[in-house]
Amino acid sequence: MAVTALDYRQQLQELLPPGAAWPRDPDAVLTQLLDGLAEEYARVDAFIAGLVEQMLPDSTADLLPEWETIAGLPGTCSAQVRSTPAARRVDLLSKLAATGGQSAPYYIEVSGFYGVPITVEEYRPFRAGLAAAGDPLTNGDWVFTWTIRAESLAGDEDAQHTFECLLGSIAPSHTLLRFAYVPVPGFKALQLMSGGVLLTANGSSALLLSEKA
């Protein structure tokens, strides 16, 4: 607990020598002088007491610019998510926690920092003997395409634009990202033992593998 200005004034008065030349009365000029010194000592004491919070990236305010410099912020999409100090800290924490990756779980983790739950759908290439007539031809660029579904952002175009910027900035160069914000009508998700999800429509496989958050 930080020491108050009153505590400091009392400490300063206790250091004074005894005698009428050193009054302790609240209205005395000397007491008023000590009050001024005590206010500054208390301010410094409170700052030091809060320094631990300032040293941590999830609670800092005064040292936020220094943390951002260390993390290389603002980034490409930072201007769209840094409207408040709290939002700046979210941007900072996501950058510090980023490990990099090319997997669906990594995209899900990054999105989670910004409070957006997603699913990532990957497309299997069409293979004779494995695929059936009527299945989508997901060859060519489709094998490098992911569909990012973020239904919580439906109807919010500004948030969608920011979200696409954020994920696009970390996407591997060979990956093509598609963004969807509404549920797929008529589709049913089946949980696989691998942890993935196979989407089916009217009982026939859509050959669409996704990873759930």
Image (tube, rainbow, N blue to C red):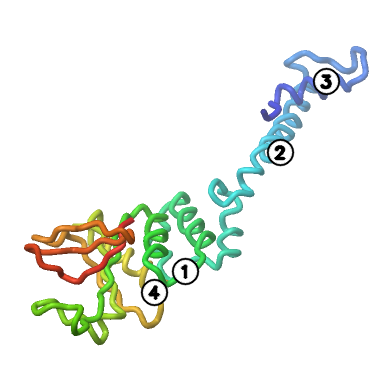
Residue 44 at x, y = what percent? 71, 38
Question: On residue 171, which mark appears?
Answer: 4
Q: Earlier in the sequence, mark 3 or mark 2?
A: 3
Residue at label 1? 75
Disc 4, SS: loop
Disc 2, SS: helix
Point 46% across, 58% down: residue: 91
Q: Earlier in the sequence, mark 3 or mark 1?
A: 3
Point 85% across, 19% down: residue: 14
Select label 4 or label 3 by which is in front: 4
Residue at label 3? 13
Residue at label 2? 44
- Mark 3 belongs to which amino acid? Gln
Are there few (<14), some (14-19), or many (20+) residues within 10 Å of tag 4? some
Q: Is residue 34 found left or right of 63 in the rendered image?
A: right
Task: Calculate the distance from the C-alpha at mark 3 to the C-alpha at mark 1.
Answer: 53 Å
**Answer yes or no: do the residues labelled 3 and 2 have beta carbons within 8 Å?**
no
Toward the viewer: 194 or 79? 194
Toward the viewer: 4 or 118? 118
Are there few (<14), some (14-19), or many (20+) residues within 10 Å of tag 2? some
- Mark 4 belongs to which amino acid? Ala
